[in-house]
Amino acid sequence: AMFKNKTIFITGASRGIGKAIGKRLAQEGANIIVTGKSSEPHPKLEGTIHTSVLEMEKAGGNALAIEMDVRFEEQVKSAIEKAVQTFGGIDVLINNASAISLQDTEHLEMKRYDLMHDVNTRGTFMASKYAIPYLKKSENPQILNLSPPLNMNPQWFGPHLAYTMAKYGMSMCVLGMSEELKKQKIGVNALWPATTIATAAVQNLLGGDEVIKRSRTPEIVSEAAFYILKRNSAENTGNFYIDEEVLAEEGITDLEKYRIDPSVDLLQDLFL
């Protein structure tokens, strides 16, 4: 199997898309580094890094939980080092950790602005920075950011400028690092869902059950990630992938099983 003994470092893997990607690669026998802030159960958020690890081990992989807040340099650095000490290297970095707040400029609190930029843009940059020395030694090294295509339409900036800047910061990391790391044959790509995905963030911040019903499950994103990460890193870099387009390239067009409620229309995701 392609991912047997490969080590996948995931930021924000207690739940949602990060967890789903970890489980999908665990099924292939990968070693999954599950990082996140949730080490104790939270009243509003299901799952912790520890429950996530149990699910990944059950799926067939090895997994290691590391409590890590992607805002803090020492924590990121030591998590990367611990991953390497445990499994001998890092083959794939998934930058999934993200904070969202959709307020306008006048009403957004600066602490929320700071959180989004610290987690999304700076966290992605920093995790990548500390992973690069180890990725260089891998046979098929990749960085995958859960971030949107860079779409400079003002409609995406007007309603929630700060969030857009923070997510596009992750996408600019793809644009820049894919170019910067070509010589090292490190593939750097983005993946974004075509529709909203049923996660805690969507439930709590985008409109509750109504939006969830019109969403797909995180498994569509993890399936797309699986196919991207199978590709050759030297040839496959600088792409802004959409989940259903990746699956279509693999001949998978029946996506019904990913729908939460097949009786309602799907809701297009932000930035598309």
Image (spheres, helix red, strand yellow):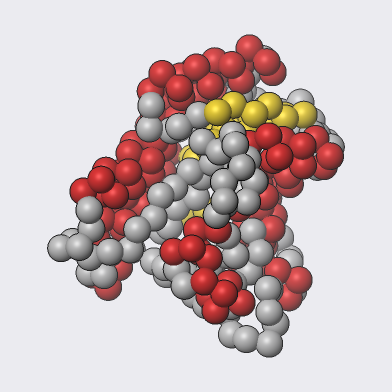
Coordinates of residue 194 in the picture (x, y in percent): 53, 68
156 vs 225, left or right, is: left
Quarter assignment of residue 254: bottom right
Coordinates of residue 83 in the picture (x, y in percent): 61, 20
Coordinates of residue 39 in the picture (x, y in percent): 59, 34
- When the figure is inspected, residue 253 is found, relative to residue 97, above or below; the finding is below
Which residue is at a point 38% across and 40% down the rendered structure image?
Answer: 119
Quick one: quadrant of the N terminus? top right
Which residue is at a point 60% across and 36% down the rendered structure image?
Answer: 40
Which residue is at a point 38% across and 32% down the rendered structure image?
Answer: 71
Q: Is residue 30 visible?
A: yes
The foreground one among 200 and 158 is 200
- When the figure is inspected, residue 269 is found, relative to residue 226, above or below; the finding is below
Q: Kindly give the residue lying farthest to the front in the view shown.
A: 43
The foreground one among 82 and 203 is 203
Q: So how many labels did they put on this image?
A: 0
80 vs 125, left or right, is: right
231 vs 96, left or right, is: right
Quarter assignment of residue 12: top right
Coordinates of residue 243 in the picture (x, y in percent): 59, 61
Q: Is residue 194 visible?
A: no
The foreground one among 11 and 136 is 11
Quick one: quadrant of the C terminus? bottom left
Q: Kindly give the residue lying farthest to the bottom in the view shown.
A: 263
Q: Kindly give the residue lying farthest to the left in the view shown.
A: 106
Which residue is at a point 63% across and 51% down the rendered structure image?
Answer: 46
154 vs 186, left or right, is: left
